Amino acid sequence: MLAKLLPFARRAHRRVLLGSSLRGLIQGPSHEAYVSAEPDPAAPGPWVSGADEDARWAAGFEASPGEGSKAARAGDAVEARVIAPTGPFTRTERIRRSSDFQSVSQKGLRRAARCFVVLAAPCSLGEGRARLGLTVSRKVGNAVVRNRVKRRIREWFRCGGRSLAAGFDLVVIARRDAASLETGQTAAELDRLVGAAR
């Protein structure tokens, strides 16, 4: 009896398998997934330091000493407070073109010292006028140091160098040792060099 029913059972099983695969082809794959209906457990809040921090650590904290340009700018803030504003350094008082630099270097008198070289030639703008050109190479130092040297030279020119150099175009070439000079020392050395170049 079982032997007679076995072929029917096999055929029925094939129909069930065939029917489910046809349903999958017709309906497409199922994109449903099991999703829990239970709420997520409460997530811990973000950690924020507050009153429970170690007071000894906060009291003993010190900023690390600055390096590079920040350390180099430490003296500049003091300089800005000590030196009073001395007026503008206008575009007409600057030597900016390469041809003007070459003209001063070819026609001018040259005076040199440990920190600066000064070239002085008659001013092309007329009597009583003075112009200043600066050359500060990378040999002097990094950008912060070079800018400080240039700022001090311009300050000298605004404070008194303009009247000392009246009638001349000046080109000031900074040497490596110029970086070690303070504002007053820069002014004294440039006064001496410009006086000798006139």
Image: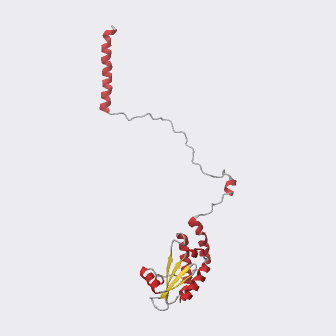
* Total numbered circles: 0
Looking at this view, is 114 or 47 the one in front?
A: 114
Residue 88 screen position, x and y as percent = 52, 81
What residue is drawn where x is 31% and y is 20%? Answer: 14
Location of residue 55 (image quadrant): bottom right
Location of residue 87 (image quadrant): bottom right
What residue is drawn where x is 31% and y is 29%? Answer: 23
Looking at this view, is 124 or 114 the one in front?
A: 114
Question: Is 107 left, or right, of 30 in this rendering?
Answer: right
Q: Is residue 168 visible?
A: yes
Q: State the residue lying farthest toward the bottom.
A: 127
Q: Is residue 86 visible?
A: no
Question: Is 122 left, or right, of 189 in this rendering?
Answer: left
What residue is drawn where x is 60% and y is 78%? Answer: 183
What residue is drawn where x is 32% and y is 22%? Answer: 16
Residue 112 screen position, x and y as percent = 55, 82
Q: What is the image's colouring? A: secondary structure
Vertical side of 66 occupied by 187: above or below: below
Location of residue 106 (image quadrant): bottom left
Question: Is 118 left, or right, of 30 in this rendering?
Answer: right
The N terminus: image quadrant? top left
Question: Is 32 left, or right, of 38 in this rendering?
Answer: left
Q: State the residue lying farthest toward the right.
A: 56
Q: State the residue lying farthest toward the top.
A: 1
Residue 128 screen position, x and y as percent = 50, 91
Residue 176 screen position, x and y as percent = 56, 74
Looking at this view, is 4 or 164 the one in front?
A: 164
